[in-house]
Image (tube, rainbow, N blue to C red):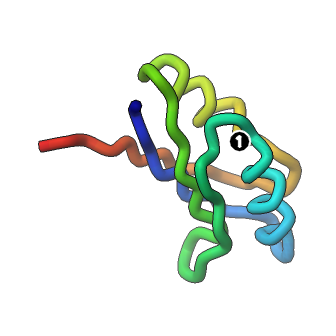
């Protein structure tokens, strides 16, 4: 299983709704509202990098999302 954190900036006041909608997306393990420069942190997982990339690029574009940054996990 390949995992990544997706840092999400939302429109003002949209963080709770974005996190709620993200939780319903297949492949999203967890989505929580956070403080700091990003508003929502989502943990996504997939069986391969292609599927993970597809989810990160198109799957998390719900209403209220302004920008995302995807941080893939690596095992060293």
Looking at the picture, how far across and down is residue 46, in whole percent? 51, 29
Q: Position of residue 32 (x, y in %)?
A: 65, 68
Q: Count neighbours of disc 1 (C-alpha within 10 A) and say few if under 14, some if 14 to 19, many if 20 or more.
A: many
Please tell me in which quadrant of the rendered image residue 3 appears: top left
Answer above or below: position of 7 versus 15: above
State the residue at coordinates (58%, 69%). 38
Please name the residue shown 55% across and 58% down the image.
Answer: 7
| Left or right position of 6 against 13 | left
Tag 1, which secondary structure? loop
Q: Is residue 76 left or right of residue 65?
A: left
> Farthest left residue?
76
Q: For the N terminus, give its image quadrant.
A: top left
The relative height of residue 30 versus residue 2 in the rendered view (above or below) is below
Q: Residue 18, image x and y in percent?
A: 80, 59
Residue 12: quadrant of the picture: bottom right
Quarter holding the C terminus is: top left
**Dot 1 corresponds to which residue?**
60
Nearer-the-camera pick, 60 or 45: 45
Residue at x-position 87% and y-position 50%: 63
* Whole-percent x, y for residue 67 in the image: 65, 52
Residue at image x 81%, y 60%? 20
Number of numbered tags placed on the structure image: 1
Q: Nearer the viewer, residue 66 or 40?
A: 40
């Amino acid at each position: 299983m390949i995992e990544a954190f997706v840092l999400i900036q939302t429109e003002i006041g949209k963080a709770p709704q974005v996190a709620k909608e993200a939780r319903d997306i297949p492949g999203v393990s967890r989505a929580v509202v956070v403080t700091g420069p990003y508003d929502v942190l989502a943990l996504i997982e997939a069986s391969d990098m292609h599927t993970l990339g597809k989810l990160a690029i198109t799957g998390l574009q719900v209403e209220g999302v302004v920008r995302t940054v995807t941080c893939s996990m690596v095992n060293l």
